[in-house]
């Protein structure tokens, strides 16, 4: 108890000093917990219009229920920091108690060493995500399974299933532990298999929206891995940079090597009591599984580091003096401090940057109208649903949840936020059914930033580090969009003339007739995607031999004195990287 209180105070002081919660997912989970507080624990998430999340499925239902008091009382952003402190203190205390079984009081030094000397692990535990609950349950499950407490094992399986999406991981661990037990004793201890599988089955059924949750699980854990190469997933899914991983974790590795080396030179007996041996086997199996997974998915550092640490401590702890063990862990902790807080990620976690601020998110939230339909990246929307819950977004948490049920819309939003779609406002309104576009400027490409700033069909509603644009018909300019042989209906948001289909991987000529009521001088901007030329009444007025990617402001200015009557415009435009088209904007003052 004293260890938990001390850990909670230390973690609380650290997290309350943070300018932001690390990872936008943290805010999403708080937003869901707040939703449950006022809408009931079976409420459907209203923020994901084109996502499986909108079906009512909640793959981390228990985690959100546990967060409910932190999100519903007082400032939920502060509550989230306190929840992080509670989760970390609980996890650290469990690690300490397991280590103390082998090291005595010296085991209470293990959590501090682990949190400081393993930055890849620390970078995961500072995120308010359900993985923290999953790791806590998994550590407890290894102990109760080893001690044959079947009821507790089944209850933990139930909690894991309703608290974390990857229930199959728990089931797989149960199968491995059962197989190990059978191998060692040649007896089929069916409780090791029946209890956890029954708990998993109960967790799948006894929760809101069970069918929708199974579909969500299938999409995230099967379909995702078959399609992850073309999805806009985060870096945490990629394998870790092993050179960097070794360098930042050097003191963690050195401490383990020193611990093992000194223990092996000792004349003390190896692990002797049956309970310690059993715990060692179950933790070692879990550690081996997650170390292998870590080499494929960097996010598995959350599990690989603590499980490996505990396996080594239990395996060699009885052969080393507690004072020596405490010295090793204490020295490694002190020496690791500059490494841990010298990495870019942890510097950001501790002090933040000028580009990220809850003040900016709050100001953005106040600018969002009620029920505004907003096109935003799924990762940005994770924070927006917390600071602007009145908005209605496209998707949250995972790109797969939009890509599978709405592939056309998913492709459109990818092109939009990558900056390769020249017709942002029309795509947002007509394909994504959105009246607004929102994004974090600091994560946008230069091409996207230019398109947003230069398109007269977009109006800035809020222009902080997070920006909100309203889509509306252009003011002060006119897009020339009536071209043959394209059949385009009247659309006040029309702007870009897409000739990709009729160009058929080569070039195409499009024609427009401009009727002039009286003699006047007009000014046009001609901005094509690829190599193009504009002729008016048979005279070439602009010839662009290279790619301009339809970036308004980078085209040719064309000024023409017209007589009254009809005038013929011809554009010859060619394919470039799979696209062809152009903008012709009438920028004549007063038009």
Image (tube, rainbow, N blue to C red):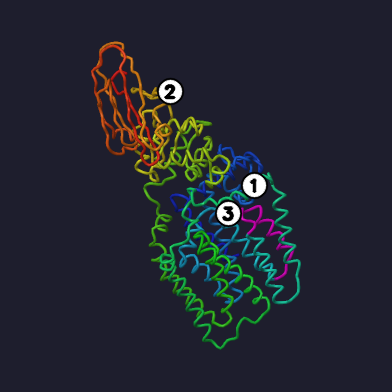
User: Looking at the picture, how far across and down is residue 517, in whole percent?
Assistant: 31, 11
**Sequence-first tag of 1 and 2:** 1
The residue range painted magenta reads 147-168
Image side of residue 280 versus residue 298, left or right: right
- Image position of 2 with respect to 272: above or below: above
Judge the density around disc 1: few (<14), some (14-19), many (≥20) Cα neighbours within 10 Å.
Answer: some
Judge the density around disc 2: few (<14), some (14-19), many (≥20) Cα neighbours within 10 Å.
Answer: few
Q: What residue does disc 2 label?
A: 492
| Element on which disc 3 rests | loop
Number of the label disc, if any, that sits on residue 370: none
User: Looking at the picture, how far across and down is residue 367, in whole percent?
Assistant: 45, 33
**Sequence-first tag of 3 and 2:** 3
Mark 3 vs mark 2, CA separation in Å = 46 Å
**Sequence-first tag of 3 and 1:** 3
User: Looking at the picture, how far across and down is residue 4, in whole percent?
Assistant: 57, 63
> Residue at 56% across / 83% down in the picture?
319
Residue 160 showing in the rendered view: yes
Mark 1 vs mark 2, CA separation in Å = 40 Å
Q: Look at the image and tell me in which quarter the C terminus lies.
A: top left
Q: Look at the image and tell me in which quarter the N terminus lies.
A: bottom right
Q: What residue does disc 1 label?
A: 215
* Quadrant in the rendering for residue 52: top right
Q: Please tell me which residue lies in front, 493 or 387.
A: 493
Q: What residue does disc 3 label?
A: 130
Which mark is nearer the camera, 3 or 2? 2
């Amino acid at each position: 108890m004293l260890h938990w209180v001390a850990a909670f105070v230390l973690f609380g002081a650290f997290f309350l000093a943070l300018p932001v919660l690390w990872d936008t997912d943290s805010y999403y989970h708080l937003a869901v917990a707040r939703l449950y507080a006022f809408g009931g624990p079976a409420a459907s998430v209203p923020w994901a219009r084109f996502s499986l999340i909108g079906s009512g499925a909640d793959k981390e239902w228990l985690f959100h229920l546990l967060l409910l008091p932190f999100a519903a009382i007082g400032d939920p952003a502060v509550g989230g920091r306190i929840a992080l402190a509670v989760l970390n203190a609980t996890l650290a205390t469990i690690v300490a108690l397991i280590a103390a079984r082998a090291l005595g009081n010296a085991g209470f030094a293990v959590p501090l060493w682990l949190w400081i000397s393993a930055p890849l692990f620390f970078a995961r535990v500072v995120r308010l995500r359900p993985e923290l609950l999953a790791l806590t349950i998994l550590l407890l499950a290894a102990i109760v399974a080893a001690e044959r407490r079947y009821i507790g094992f089944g209850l933990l399986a139930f909690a894991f299933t309703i608290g974390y999406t990857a229930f199959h991981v728990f089931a797989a661990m149960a199968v491995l532990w059962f197989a190990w037990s059978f191998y060692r004793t040649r007896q089929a201890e069916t409780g090791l298999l029946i209890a956890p599988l029954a708990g998993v089955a109960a967790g799948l059924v006894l929760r809101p929206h069970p069918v929708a949750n199974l579909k969500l699980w299938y999409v995230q854990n099967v379909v995702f891995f078959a399609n992850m190469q073309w999805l806009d997933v985060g870096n945490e899914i990629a394998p870790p940079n092993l050179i960097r991983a070794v360098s930042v974790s050097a003191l963690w590795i050195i401490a383990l090597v020193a611990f093992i080396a000194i223990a092996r030179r000792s004349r003390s007996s190896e692990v002797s009591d049956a309970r310690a041996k059993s715990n060692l086997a179950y933790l070692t199996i879990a550690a081996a599984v997650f170390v292998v997974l870590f080499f494929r998915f960097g996010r598995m550092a959350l599990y690989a580091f603590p499980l490996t640490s505990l396996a080594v401590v239990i395996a060699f702890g009885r052969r080393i003096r507690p004072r020596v063990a405490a010295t090793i862990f204490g020295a490694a902790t002190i020496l690791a401090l500059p490494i841990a807080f010298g990495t870019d990620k942890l510097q950001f976690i501790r002090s933040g940057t000028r580009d990220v601020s809850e003040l900016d998110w709050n100001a953005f939230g106040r600018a969002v109208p009620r029920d505004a339909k907003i096109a935003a990246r799924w990762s940005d929307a994770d924070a927006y649903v917390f600071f602007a819950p009145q908005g209605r977004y496209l998707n949250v948490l995972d790109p797969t949840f939009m890509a599978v049920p709405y592939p056309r819309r998913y492709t459109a939003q990818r092109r939009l936020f990558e900056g390769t779609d020249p017709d942002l406002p029309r795509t947002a309104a007509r394909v994504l059914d959105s009246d607004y576009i929102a994004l974090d400027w600091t994560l946008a490409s230069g091409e996207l930033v230019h398109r947003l700033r230069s398109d007269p069909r977009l109006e800035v509603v809020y222009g902080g580090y997070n920006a909100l644009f309203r889509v509306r018909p252009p003011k002060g300019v006119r897009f020339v969009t009536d071209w043959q042989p394209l059949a385009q209906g009247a659309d006040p948001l029309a702007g870009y003339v897409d000739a990709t289909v009729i160009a058929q991987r080569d070039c195409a000529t499009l024609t427009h007739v401009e009727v002039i009521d009286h003699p006047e001088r007009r000014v046009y901007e001609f901005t094509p995607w690829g190599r193009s030329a504009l002729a008016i009444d048979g005279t070439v007025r602009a010839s662009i031999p290279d790619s301009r990617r339809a970036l308004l402001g980078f085209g040719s200015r064309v000024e023409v004195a017209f007589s009254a009557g009809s005038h013929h415009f011809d554009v010859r435009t060619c394919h470039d990287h799979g696209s062809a088209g152009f903008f012709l904007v009438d920028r004549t003052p007063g038009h």
